Image (cartoon, rainbow, N blue to C red):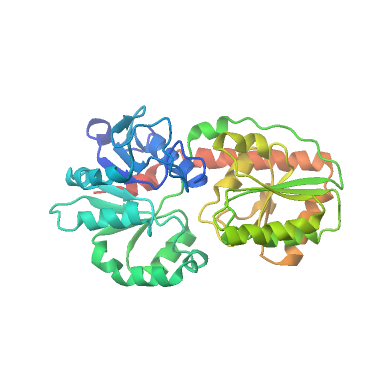
Amino acid sequence: MPDQSPSFFVLNRPSILAFFDHFYPSVKSGGPAKSALGFAELLADAYDLTIVTRNHDFGDSIPYPSVVANTRTTFSNFGVYYLDRQGFSLVKHLIQQKPDFIYLNSFFSSDFTIKPLLKLKGIRGASKIVLAPRGELAPSALQKSWWKKKVYRTIYPLLEGNITYQASSEQEAKNILDFLPGRRVVVAPNLRPPSDLSQLPVILPKEKGRLRVCLIARIHPIKNIHQAIAWVLKVNSNQLEFDIYGFPEDAVYLEKCRKLAADSGGTIRLLPGLSTSAVMETLARYHLFFLPTLGENFGHSILEAFIASRPVLISDQTPWKGLLKSQAGLDAPLKEKEMREGLAFFLNMGNEEYQQWCTQARAKAVSFFEAQQNLKPYFDLFKF
């Protein structure tokens, strides 16, 4: 346990009942499941932690073969309930045990935020609540199903009670306060399992005038994949290959991207989504990670590129800023000129310079994992 933790945690750990839509061994939910596992692994020494989640992956109905539903599964220092549809009756029972804190990892989740908030109503001496919107209150995210969210915003004060909100960054704190003025907000950055950094980087030689680019993300409009394809198409080089890996969330958008990629003559490919274990070895085959996203609360795939020692070309709509100064990548405005110039910059880079950028990308990942050893923001978040 980090040195800055209050000494009483060792003798009398506060209890947390945490709700996550998806948790290990989820593959299709991507970075959020990794972040949830990091939350559990890093906080469970200081807190008596129990997690409640689904017993199946994102978009699936088939349960994980490795878990038993509706009973407590014990990990090294925390427990998990994997619920099927019948198991949701357990939620009220677990809440009635009155843990010190209830942690909700979404603002809009029907099963894992709204239902627990409803069950909390009327319980005297109920738990303190911490809610992490996870980027759902960013303007770009609110545009999706905006009318449903507007209705929910109207009735939300009836459910709210005394809630502390977790922001992953100062920008998210602003988004939360714009949406919910006057609330208590604590900035506590996303966590990742420390073991992620054990993935050793692979050296990939780079010829000037040749570039292999990948994008790993959900196939969803907020990732701006169609625009990424259009900008790559305008780089006049048949030595630029662009592969896109992702689980589709929007069939219409997937077809739009496929039609655009068809104009590339085979240099742009849409490929199936990756299992968690395949991400690092896939990144190692490419020179550059490209994600001109419309908005990221964190950007797990960006961090994974840094872990793999690969520079990135991303939009300026993520928390990863000032990358040019550190030579870990480029964070550029969402404009054709800047994005095309960014692609050309890496395309024309020779091997010696490229390897320096790879080294700096890895240093960015190391710096992140060193910083997350400081858990004081979480001790501030879960404070009596």
Residue shown at 21% from the left, 54% from the top:
119
Task: Give the farthest residue toward the top.
Answer: 76
Query: Is 42 displayed left or right of 50 in the figure?
Result: right
Task: Tell me which residue sits at (49%, 61%) in the image.
Answer: 171
Judge by depth and name the residue closer to the eye, 262 or 360.
262
Residue 95 locus on image (x, y percent): 21, 46
Q: Residue at x 60, y 44 (%)?
A: 273
Q: Between 11 and 88, which is closer to the camera in this rendering?
A: 88
Q: Kindly indicate the quadrant of the structure image that contains residue 257.
A: bottom right
Of residues 244 and 327, which is closer to you in this image? 244
Q: Nearer the viewer, residue 269 or 39?
A: 269
**Picture coordinates of residue 325, whole percent (x, y):** 68, 52
Residue 229 visible, this angle = no
Numbered-mark total: 0
Judged left or right of residue 375, residue 121 is: left
Query: Does residue 305 appear in this view?
Result: yes
Q: Quadrant of the N terminus?
A: top left
| Rendering coords of residue 121 (x, y %) | 19, 58
Task: Name, please, the residue furthest toward the left.
Answer: 124
Q: Is residue 132 left or right of residue 219?
A: left
Does residue 300 appear to the left or right of 214 in the view shown?
left
- Specify the quadrant of the image occupied by residue 235: bottom right
Spot occupied by residue 61 in the image (x, y as percentages of width and height):
43, 44
